[in-house]
Image (cartoon, coloured by chain):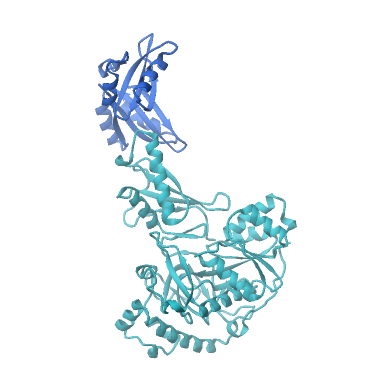
Chain colours: A cyan, B blue
């Protein structure tokens, strides 16, 4: 019963179905503009001087190969606004992604950037069935996180109505879905699955007008999609983006659902071997490296996303001429996405350092017992941490929990374990055991 | 005359207590008494034994975290109100008890209660003129 045909609609046919040669010219001009804008950012200015790069020397998109990479660490090092290319007066919005030591990474938007972002979200929403007559519930958090406000603007751009529910409180989310007669749901895939199972348990499945879901913000699998669609009788679409690039809107699925169409008039997306940084063969998995072509406030060049995916360039039944990327299949670093929040093992180490000056051995364990992530940290007890008084041990455990939450923004279960019980590694320590099965 | 107590961190899982006892057995060490404070996830095992230093070495060598703490062993008459009378004296001196555990050994009409005070020597000082008998290590482990 969940099988219904999603009509093939295109929000911006001129951009999305552009002849490829035509697009390549547009990309070359966009890349030149980005190099020009990026010259105002000290990090890039220095790199351009070293590499003898000028805007005039950019003649085609192939010149991308000469440009320097940008890493998350580069962005962090320029905290707070070192990667902004426009004066403060021209900023219209600031968002942020989580940092590793409690400090976020800020990203800025001009008026034009916000306008572009709304268009990009509108593109994947329309590709996945959104029409102006629909009522859409946004269950992403509204705040520094790009998900809530990004999708909100995209829905308005399409002309549909938004119900900005924000995140949390499952019972209330379901009440809103039912009583407002919501047609389309926006949230993370794991939260959609959680809502679906709660709705089924409450016997409300047939009382909903829900038809579509647009899910993103974390990796998920076809198996999860099947579960969500079956449980709710809807069609669920995948979309991809990251705040360092713009937020959601970098790519999204069409009705054919054979990968996510990359908005190539706005972004150059490379798929590189994370070790050699050379392009992988067509269709092979590699790290996505993204360059913006029209962003003003934060132009970004060859950003190493650390997200692993495949890129397909064959034609798509929908008529779009853009290349498509697979689901995110993993990471080329040790970042975890827990309940939609990015967390690095080094953040946990930092929290443990704050407790006692030196970090003990620890292991992060992730699971998904129902549909929501559970995160625990096993911490080996050391002589100096141990007390014969239970109260002192509880205080230690609670203190670790508080420091971890202060840095990551997430609750972790803290388990104190006996010394030498966690596995030791020669070379790079493995700090995470992920039992969530996030990849097919 | 505080008594030396060994405290060990043990996880709350099958086999963790027997691992401790196995080490003691292999070293031919006998436990006089023990108490276990446990939570869902871990516990603190407290042991009294004659050769505490030898035990500590063996346990640490086996990888356990061991802490040596001074505790007081008080003799308590085995009759209704025996413990109440002693606690009333502690209250009067505003001595707060971190934790305590009781055991009997070889005496028909008396029990021994082990008390953990924040400052055991200060407690001894306060209790020296009270009608309370402090049990010495030599009596406890004879």
Percent coordinates x, y for residue A191 in the rendering: 59, 57
Q: Nearer the viewer, residue B71 or B5?
A: B71
Task: Classify B51 as above or below A374.
Answer: above
Q: Quadrant of residue A176?
A: bottom right
Task: Classify A415 as above or below A132.
Answer: above
Regarding residue B74, the answer to whether it shows in the image is yes
Percent coordinates x, y for residue A204 in the rendering: 72, 54
Q: Nearer the viewer, residue A52 or B97?
A: B97
In the rendered image, which quarter contains the N terminus of chain A? bottom right
Percent coordinates x, y for residue B29 in the rendering: 29, 24
Which residue: 41% across, 62% down?
A99
Task: Classify A127 as above or below A393.
Answer: below
Percent coordinates x, y for residue A308 in the rendering: 47, 67
In the image, taking residue A406 as reference, residue A49 lies left or right, namely: left
Which residue: 38% across, 90% down?
A57
Regarding residue A300, the answer to whether it shows in the image is no
In the rendered image, which quarter contains the C terminus of chain A? bottom right
Which residue: 53% across, 62% down?
A219
Task: Classify A277 as above or below A350.
Answer: below
User: Residue farthest to the top?
Assistant: B108
**How many marks can you see?**
0
Q: Quadrant of residue A260?
A: bottom right
């Amino acid at each position: 019963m969940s099988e219904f045909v999603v009509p093939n609609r295109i929000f911006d046919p001129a951009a999305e179905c552009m002849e490829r040669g035509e697009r390549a010219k547009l990309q070359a001009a966009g890349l030149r503009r980005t190099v020009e804008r990026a010259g105002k950012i000290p990090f890039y200015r220095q790199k351009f001087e070293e590499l003898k790069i000028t805007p005039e020397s950019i003649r085609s998109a192939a010149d991308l190969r000469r440009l320097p990479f940008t890493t998350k660490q580069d962005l962090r090092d320029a905290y707070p606004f070192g990667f902004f290319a426009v004066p403060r007066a021209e900023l219209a919005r600031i968002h942020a992604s989580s940092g590793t030591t409690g400090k976020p990474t800020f990203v800025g938007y001009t008026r034009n950037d916000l306008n572009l972002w709304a268009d990009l979200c509108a593109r994947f929403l329309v590709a996945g069935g959104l029409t102006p007559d629909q009522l859409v519930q946004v269950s992403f958090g509204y705040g520094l996180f790009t998900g809530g406000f990004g999708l909100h603007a995209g829905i308005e751009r399409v002309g549909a109505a938004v119900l900005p529910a924000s995140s949390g409180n499952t019972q209330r989310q379901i009440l809103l879905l039912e009583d407002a007669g919501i047609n389309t749901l926006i949230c993370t895939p794991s939260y959609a699955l959680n809502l679906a199972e709660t709705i089924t348990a409450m016997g409300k499945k047939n009382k909903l007008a829900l038809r579509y879901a647009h899910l993103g913000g974390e990796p998920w699998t076809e198996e999860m999609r099947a579960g969500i669609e079956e449980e709710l009788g809807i069609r669920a679409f995948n979309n991809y983006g990251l705040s360092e690039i713009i937020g959601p809107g970098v790519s999204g699925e069409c009705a054919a659902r054979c990968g996510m169409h990359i908005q190539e008039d706005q972004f150059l997306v490379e798929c590189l071997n994370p070790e050699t940084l050379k392009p992988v063969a067509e269709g092979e998995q590699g790290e996505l490296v993204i360059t913006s072509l029209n962003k003003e406030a934060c132009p970004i060049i060859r950003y190493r996303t650390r997200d692993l995916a495949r890129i397909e360039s064959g034609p798509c039944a929908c008529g779009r001429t853009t290349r498509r990327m697979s689901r995110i299949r993993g990471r080329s670093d040790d970042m975890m996405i827990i309940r939609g929040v990015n967390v690095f093992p080094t953040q946990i180490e930092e929290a443990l350092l704050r407790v006692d000056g030196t970090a003990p051995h620890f292991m992060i364990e992730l699971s998904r017992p129902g549909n929501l992530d559970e995160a625990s940290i096993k911490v080996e007890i050391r002589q100096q941490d141990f007390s014969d008084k239970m109260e002192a041990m509880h205080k230690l455990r609670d203190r670790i929990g508080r420091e971890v939450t202060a840095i990551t923004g997430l609750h972790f279960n803290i388990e104190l374990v006996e010394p030498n019980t966690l596995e030791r590694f020669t070379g790079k320590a493995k700090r995470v055991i992920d039992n969530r099965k996030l990849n097919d | 005359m505080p008594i030396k107590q060994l405290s060990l961190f043990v996880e709350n899982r099958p086999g963790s207590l027997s691992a401790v006892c196995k080490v003691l057995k292999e070293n031919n060490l006998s436990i006089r008494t023990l108490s276990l404070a446990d939570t869902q996830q871990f516990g603190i095992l407290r042991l009294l034994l004659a050769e505490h230093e030898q035990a500590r070495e063996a346990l640490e060598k086996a990888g356990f975290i061991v802490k040596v703490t001074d505790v007081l062993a008080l003799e308590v008459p085995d009759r209704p109100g025996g413990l109440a009378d002693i606690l009333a004296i502690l209250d009067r001196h505003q001595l707060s008890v971190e934790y305590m555990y009781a055991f009997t050994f070889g005496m028909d009409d008396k029990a021994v209660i082990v008390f953990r005070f924040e400052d055991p020597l200060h407690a001894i000082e306060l209790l020296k003129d009270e009608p309370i008998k402090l049990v010495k290590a030599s009596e406890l482990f004879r």
